[in-house]
């Protein structure tokens, strides 16, 4: 017998979008060269290979985010201890919104996410590194 879902993905996304500030692709393009913003690519490695990456973005597969953020974790990555605004992105903006809530709940601040994700970035003319 199938389980009954009590909170659907859309409700989770609505809550995430209410809590995590979204930046437009145009805003993100302007933020990329700044040292006080770190772009975090949450996409699967196959997506990077297939579609390329935002130059200089740090790749953190979504499944590792909590472990890499927490300094008590044996998998912690120092990049998450930096004093910067973290710009999360995925392919379309859904995973990054949900990841943003998780990061905020863990105490990582400030966190924003790229509205429309990598797809919107490309459509807006953002730079793409095809060597990913």
Image (cartoon, rainbow, N blue to C red):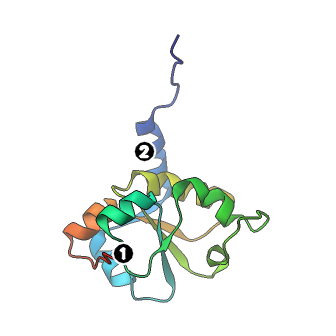
74 up-or-down from 99: above or below: below
* Place of residue 36 in the rendered image (x, y in percent of width and height, measured from the top left): 51, 86
17 up-or-down from 68: above or below: above
The one nearer the camera, 107 or 128, is 128
Quarter of the figure with the C terminus: bottom left
98 up-or-down from 31: above or below: above
Q: Residues within 10 Å of mark 2 (few under 14, many from 20)?
A: few
Is 9 on the left-hand or right-hand side of 128?
right
Q: Quadrant of residue 29?
A: bottom left
Circle 1 residue: 54
Q: Is residue 107 visible?
A: no
Q: Quadrant of residue 80?
A: bottom right
Is 53 on the left-hand or right-hand side of 104?
left
Q: Is residue 111 visible?
A: yes
Could you say whether the residue bearing mark 1 is in a helix, strand or loop? loop
- First-in-chain label (2 vs 1): 2
Residue at 45% over, 76% down: 57
Single out the mark in the foreground, 2 or 1.
Answer: 1
Mark on residue 14?
2
Residue at 28% over, 69% down: 121
Q: CA distance from mark 2 to mark 1?
A: 26 Å
Is 107 on the left-hand or right-hand side of 3?
right
Q: Which residue extends farthest right?
A: 72
Mark on residue 71?
none
């Amino acid at each position: 017998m199938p389980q009954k879902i009590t909170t659907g993905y859309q409700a989770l996304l609505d809550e995430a979008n209410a809590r995590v500030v979204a930046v437009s692709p145009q805003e993100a393009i302007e933020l990329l060269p700044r040292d006080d913003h770190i772009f975090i690519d949450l996409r699967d490695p196959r997506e990077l290979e297939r579609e390329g990456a935002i130059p200089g973005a740090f790749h953190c597969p979504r499944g590792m985010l909590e472990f890499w953020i927490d300094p008590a974790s044996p998998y912690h990555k120092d990049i998450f201890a930096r004093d910067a605004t973290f710009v999360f992105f995925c392919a379309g903006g859904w995973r990054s919104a949900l990841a943003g809530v998780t990061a905020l709940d863990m105490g990582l601040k400030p966190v924003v996410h790229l509205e429309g994700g990598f797809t919107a970035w490309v459509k807006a003319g953002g730079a793409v590194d095809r060597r990913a």
